[in-house]
Image: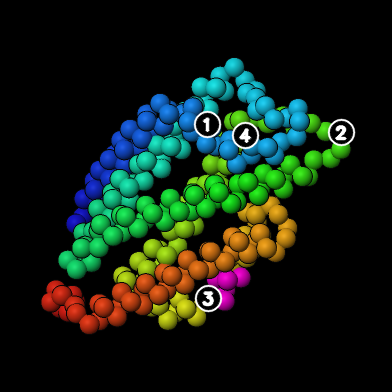
Amino acid sequence: MTFTGHLGELRRALVVSSLALLAGMIVGVIFSDFLDRLLRAPIEGLLPAGSDQPVFLGIFEPIFYRLKLGFIGGLVLASPVIFQQLWWFIAPALYPRERRLALPFILLATAFFAGGVTFCYAIILPQAAAFAVAQMTDNTRMILSLQSYLSQSAMFLLAFGLVFETPLLVFALCFLGVVKPSTMARFRKYVLLGAFIVSAIITPTPDAFNQAMVAVPMYLLFELGVLAGRLAVRRRAQGQDPEEKGH
């Protein structure tokens, strides 16, 4: 396919993904009250007396708040379509045997993304909020802006959703022959160190236990990707398509 052809395919994938995101955002806005209650759940009971009523700081903030809630909800709802379009875009570069992995890729990518968001929502957000509130000095009062809280919590949720895609990324690199699983395995000590560095940055609590709760899953996700890559390379070596052998 020519470069112009690739650009046309990319534009199609972006248009379909954008339409799916728009449809999901409409659904998210409709159910924004539910999403609002869901978003506030991790901080319920954490705010001190007199600060437990979140506020808007501008007259138009309620509108933008609902739109942002809808966008976040729409992104989660549209994620299967977005992953499907990503696969559809790269599929022409794959062999027939590799293209048959489309459905597992879409399902696993969606499941890992949802798992990362859920892990952050259930574990990281409550701990981060509790630690932040504990840093308040005496005779101070916190005014919680819903806009600010939404932006910060959304950053955490989406970041963990992407981090949980690590197994698929490692698997894809190994399966496509970009890097060997043995090469990836040799970097495991650096990955482990990097996981703890990242956890120290994104986890506000200074104790080792809470940092390990973030770093260990990240490292295990990497090991899961390496293991899947080894199994895929082994199966690929055992039975290649004639088209692959010719290359």
Amino acid at dot 3: Arg
- Label 4 CA crowd tier, 10 Å (few <14, some 14–19, many 20+): few
Where disc 4 sits, the SS reads helix
Q: Position of residue 51 (x, y in %)?
A: 73, 30
Sequence-wise, the earlier of marks 1 and 2 is 1
Disc on the earlier residue, 4 or 2: 2
| Residues marked 3 and 4 touching at CB (< 8 Å) | no
Residue located beneath label 4 in the image: 148
Label 3 neighbour load within 10 Å: few <14, some 14-19, many 20+ = some
In the picture, residue 61 is in which quadrant? Answer: top right
Give the spatial CA distance, label 3 vs label 4: 37 Å
Q: Which residues are magenta?
A: 189-193
Location of mark 1 (residue):
36
Q: Main secondary structure of the magenta part?
A: helix
Q: Amino acid at mark 2?
A: Asn
Callout in the foreground (3, 1) = 1
